Structures are given as structure tokens and as C-alpha cells.
Image (cartoon, coloured by chain):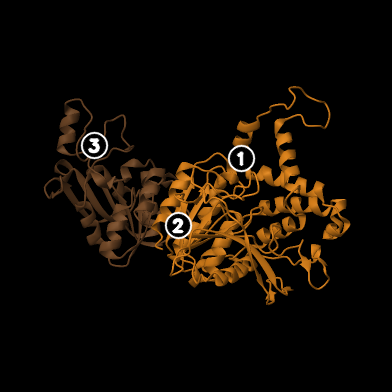
Chain colours: A brown, B orange
Amino acid sequence: MTEIFGRFDFDVIARWISPGERVLDLGCGDGSLLKFLKVERGIRGYGVDNAPENVLAAIRNGVNVLQFDLEKGLAGVDDDAFDHVIMSLSLQTVRHTVLLVKEMLRVGNEAVVSFPNFGHRSHRESIARGRMPVSEALPYQWFDSPNVRFFTIADFEELCANNGIAIREGLFFDEGRSVIDDPNLNADMALYRLARC
Amino acid sequence: MNSVGIVAPKSVRFDHAISLKSGATLPGFELVYETYGELNAEASNAVLVCHALSGSHHVAGFYADQDKSTGWWDNLVGPGKPLDTNRFFVVGVNNLGGCYGSTGPNSINPATGKRYGADFPVVTVEDWVATQARLADHLGIERWAAVVGGSLGGMQAMEWTLQFPERIRHALIIAAAPKLSTQNIAFNELARQAILSDPDFHGGHYYEHGVVPVRGLRLARMVGHITYLSDDQMAEKFGRELKTGKLSYGYDVDFQIESYLRYQGDRFTTYFDANTYLITTKALDYFDPAREYGGNLQAALARAKADFFVASFSTDWRFSPERSREIVYALMHCGHNVSYAEIDCDAGHDSFLLDDRQYHGVVGAYLDRIET
């Protein structure tokens, strides 16, 4: 999923990761983020993905990849096994959202989550015109989208508040540029650092 | 497909005594092996392929004077294949206690001048790895680029990382388990009892009587075959198809599956040794590296220094994906490098011997990463 936004998403995540950390990347795709963090931060990382083609691509990319089904949670992973658990543009592709975010914070000291903001102005305009949004952040037609959960920045922050998840930092972007003013309307992507309350 | 072509086995004799895990000693032993590809000048491209229950040193290629003699993992090993003999020097070895030429129960016991038979000591996965290390010394291989194995072969790859952490860079553990389940042991015991209770077994000294415990060995193989296949695949392959089109109302073969099992069982008795079968099932039962760490697999694997590739198959119920995940989680918690692929394949445990696109894709991709 990460290829949609290119590297700026990676750069932000890399700033949140200290050198040598243990990192778990859920929905790692072809492993480019892990590879990037390995080079930039010298992390010891593992990617998780359940798509056979992604497992193959990640192995080719030289990273550790584990073929697990995220919908089944992370039951085999010990508490606090990782410094950071990342879901880069993949949270919207899993059904059990709350279970997974809680699992991320069980096995990791801190979670990093990025997702496309369905509340972005262009998406609202599209819906107002009576059509499902298709944009750089949401490049799929409704019938072939890998996304199964559609939520906004406001929705996500409410989910965190209702589930005892602390937001340590939130950064918002529109086509790669930082957004400060009304991110729920103006940002097409959000990045969060999350922790247990 | 490209083949390594005509191959011939070699053998090496080690004349110094070896003590085994059981406490028994052997005055010396011989190992039969084959090699494919060329060992490079730095001896940094050597890959050991470990065999499972009924396998041998004959991994790839074929014999000049023998029909149907293709090696058991020929679809994986060869020029341009996932384990590419253009890059790697591949070694296959028949394990100690085997029946394909390495010293085993049907070898002559120098102390008696007769075949060992039941007097051949029980050997373990640890013993196999220790003897494979002697072969590595003989071949001038200080450190394997990789050790690869499926099933019981995967257990040997794991054992290599524990017994000789400095002598292996990568372990590929395929369709294996960190130890046998209770059910696995139960099936092995069934197989052993079939052999031990055969009147032709003669306490393991059947060679002297000029007989083979054919019925027991046959039954053992039939039980084994059931556990190697998946329920779905068996149903798909044989269904309830009748051999002659009608029921016999007797105990001869009615269903195709009966015919298949009898055929597999009969064929096995023509080339496999019953004592080797007994020893090998014991080696399987005993393998449990976590045992001396109070059952903590992570603690057991901590001393490994290799990188790991683990793979399992969706329909394998003998060593299910869950068993491979135990290995993966333990390695991950140790902080070892590990990649894990769970292959969607309908052929049960035997999937590891098949040429599945995704399976060979990930194995090949992992091996391609290994520097030589």
C-alpha cells in the first residue's frame, strides 16, 4: 500500500523510530518501509503480510517477512516484544480494527498508524455529487478496493478515545504537504503515534 | 526442467570411534553422499540437503544404469532451479543408521562379523548432525551457506544451528515441527508395533534368517502414507472409487485407496529396511531441542546465529502450519532473522516434495539472497 504516497510517509515514520529498535510492520506489502528503516535507522524488523505475492516480494527485498493472517490477531507474539508496531496505510484493509490496534499496543510499546482520510474535502465533494471517491489517496474503484473500513480522522480519534488509546502525536498531509488547519477536511492522509493510556 | 544429469554416489569412511547421544559408541562409520555443482575456492557456497524418513543421499539427477532413478528433490535442486547448482555446491547424505549405503543396521558389525540388526544403536537427530559435520570436514566445508530440509530434514537444519552455530549461515526448515506432537508419536508407535510384531522380525536379526518383516514394514508404510496426505487430496484422488467397479463383499481390495496403500506398502518393502524405519521413527520422537530448557523453545534457539527461512503447507496435518509458527515465534522473540511462508497447497505433508509455484518461488527468492 505504501507505494501510493511514496517516501514522505516513510520519512515521518523514520523520525519516530530510534536507531536499533525492534519493529513490527503489519501489512508490510513488499517490505520497502522495513528496508528503508533498516538502512536509515538500523532497526531489527519483521514484516507481516498474508498475500503470497507480497511475501515473495518482501523476501526478494531482503527483509524478514512472516506470512500471518492479521485478522486472527497477534496471539503468538509476546507482550512488549517490540518498540514500535507499524501499520502504514493498511489499517483500513482489516476488519477487526479495534482488536488489531489493541494488539499493536499489547505487543509494542508504541504504535504508528497511517491511513487515508475518507473525510477529505475532495471525497466529500465526490459523495455530494453522488459518486464514491477515487483520488490519489483512495486510488481504487469501489468494486476492486482492498479497503474494507472507511473512516475519517474524526472517526479514528473517537475510536481511540473510546478504547483507552492515547494519541501522542498526529500529523496530517494533503498530497504530501503538511496540513494544520482542520485536517479532517483538508488532509488526505493521517499519521499517528499511539500508546496505551 | 534442467537436471544435474548423471550422478554417482561417493562414500567416506571415518575410522575413529564416535559416541552417540544414547551413550552407545560406534567404532567407526561410513557415510554415502552425493554432490552437485562446484565448491568455490572459498568453500562459501556449500548447501547441505537433509533427508526425511525414507529419503537418501540421492537428492538430484539420475543414475546412468538405472531407470526411474531420479533424485527425491530433483524438482528443487539443479541448474536454474530454486536451489541452483550453478551457484551452490549441494551435498546430499544418507544418514547414519540408514539403509542406502551409510553404516546402519544392515552393515557388518566388526565386533561380530555379522550384520548389526537390532544391535545397531538408536541414533538421534543430534547424532546425524554430528556425523554430517564430519562429512563437512572431509569436504573442506568449514561453514555451510545453508542447510535445507523438509520434515525430519528440517529438524536437522534446526539442529545444525544449535549444535554448530558458527558453521551454518542459513537454515531452511520446511514442513517441520520443533518436536513431535503426542499424536505424531502415537502414529510412530503404531508403525513400530507393526514391524516389531511381525513374526519375521526375529528381534531385529531377520537378516540371519534370510527373511524380511514384509508385513510389518508394509503396514508401517501404509500408516505413514495416510498421515502424509490430506483428507481432501485423498478424496479428490481416489474418492470412493471401486477398483473393479463392484463391491466384493470380502476383504480383498474394494476401493482404489486400498489398492494405493497396498501398492505403496509393497513397494516400500522392496527397498527400505525395517530396522532403519524403527531407528528413524525414534529419532523423530526424541527430537525436542527445548527439552533441556524446560520446554522453552525460545531459550533453546537463543544460541543460534543463523538466519532462518521457515515454510509450512496449509493442508499438512502431520506437521501443521501451527507447528511451524511455534518455531517462527520463538525465533522472532530471540531476535533472529526469520522469514515465514505458509503455502496454500492441497497435498498435505507431502506438499514439500512437490513443485508448487509459490513454494518454489519463495524458497528460490530466499536462496538467491544468500551470498556465496
Compute the Cα span from label 2 to label 3. Answer: 33 Å
Q: Position of residue A96 (x, y in %)?
A: 39, 43
Q: Which residue is depicted at the point 29% across and 44% down?
A: A1
Specify the quadrant that holds the C terminus of chain B: bottom left
Vertical comparison of B223 with B128: above or below: above
User: Same chain for the residues at labels 2 and 3, yes or no?
Assistant: yes
Mark 3, other Cα within 10 Å: few <14 / some 14–19 / many ≥20: few
Q: Which amino acid lies under the numbered mark 1 shown in the image of this protein?
A: Ser
Q: Is residue B163 visible?
A: no
Q: How many marks?
A: 3
Going from N to C along the chain, the mark reached first, 2 or 3, is: 2
Q: Position of residue B351 (x, y in %)?
A: 56, 44
Q: Which amino acid lies under the numbered mark 2 shown in the image of this protein?
A: Val
Quickly name the residue at label 1: B230
Compute the Cα span from label 1 to label 2. Answer: 29 Å
User: Same chain for the residues at labels 1 and 3, yes or no?
Assistant: no
Mark 1, other Cα within 10 Å: few <14 / some 14–19 / many ≥20: many
Q: Which amino acid lies under the numbered mark 3 shown in the image of this protein?
A: Pro
Q: Chain of mark 3?
A: A
Q: Which residue is depicted at the point 16% across and 26% down?
A: A129
> Are the two marked residues, 2 and 3, in contact with CB atoms closer than 8 angstroms?
no
- Find residue A77 and name its label: 2
Which numbered mark, 1 or 3, is in the foreground of this view? Answer: 1
Vertical comparison of A21 with A65: above or below: below
Q: Position of residue A157 (x, y in %)?
A: 26, 47
Could you tell me which secondary element the residue under label 2 belongs to?
loop
**Quick check: B100 left or right of B213?**
left
- Find residue A139 and name its label: 3
Which numbered mark, 2 or 3, is in the foreground of this view? Answer: 3
